[in-house]
Image (cartoon, rainbow, N blue to C red):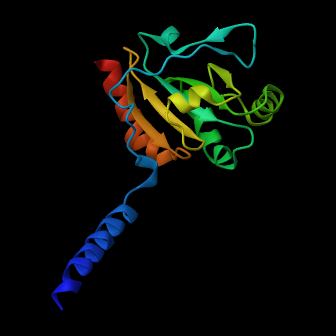
């Protein structure tokens, strides 16, 4: 009878961990980048491919890096919210077009609106990998010193904008 106690204890512990994991919000997957400098890149701009952009160009500003793609169905859900956020001019939003083609990305932005100061092309996904992107969309808040302060996985919602992103952005702007 005692030989069953150890396996039973392990089973109960695993069930407890599984239950705790299922109650977590998947949009708040912790990122090892939070609190660390945003990974550097120099990628071609979608609108002007002869020019490149890198995060160091926004030093001194609080900004959002939104990882998106024209093939991403979840990106369609958040896109109107990003367009609205851009119209409000609360924060600079930069797009990282992930594993997409320039033609499809340009067409998508023309059809759905362009909330981005600019978008860069990450056709091979290398910059996305450096940011730990596991799926699109993902959004990063980057502070004035170029440090990642928050990562939101999945399509941003109005609630996430109002309760998480905007308060954090306001706090970072003051600091």
- Residue 41: percent from left, percent from top: 56, 16
User: Toward which corner of the image does residue 88 lie, by quadrant?
Assistant: top right
Q: Viewer-proximal residue, 108 or 10?
A: 10
Name, please, the residue furthest toward the front: 3
Which residue is found at the position 43% from the left and 14% from the top? 61
Q: Viewer-proximal residue, 150 or 171?
A: 150
- Residue 174: percent from left, percent from top: 30, 19
Give above or below for 77 relative to 116: below
Which residue is found at the position 64% from the left and 40% from the top? 80
Name, please, the residue furthest toward the bottom: 1
Which residue is found at the position 36% from the left and 67% from the top? 18
30 left or right, relative to 8: right
All told, the count of numbered labels is: 0
* Placement of the N terminus among the 4 image quadrants: bottom left
- Residue 156: percent from left, percent from top: 52, 44
Which residue is found at the position 51% from the left and 15% from the top? 55
- Residue 98: percent from left, percent from top: 66, 33
């Amino acid at each position: 009878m005692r030989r069953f106690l150890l396996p039973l204890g392990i089973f109960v512990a695993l069930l407890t961990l599984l239950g705790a994991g299922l109650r977590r919000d998947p949009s708040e997957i912790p990122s090892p980048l939070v609190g660390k400098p945003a990974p550097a890149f120099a990628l071609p701009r979608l609108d002007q491919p002869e020019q490149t952009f890198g995060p160091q160009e926004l030093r001194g500003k609080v900004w959002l890096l939104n990882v998106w793609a024209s093939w991403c169905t979840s990106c369609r859900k958040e896109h109107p919210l990003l367009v609205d956020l851009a119209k409000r001019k609360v924060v600079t939003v930069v797009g990282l077009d992930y594993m997409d083609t320039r033609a499809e990305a340009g067409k998508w932005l023309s059809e759905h609106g362009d909330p981005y100061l600019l978008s860069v092309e990450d056709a091979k996904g290398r910059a996305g990998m450096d940011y730990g992107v596991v799926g699109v969309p993902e959004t990063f808040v980057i502070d004035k010193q170029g440090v990642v302060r928050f990562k939101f996985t999945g399509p941003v919602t109005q609630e996430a904008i109002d309760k998480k992103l905007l308060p954090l952005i306001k706090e970072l702007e003051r600091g």
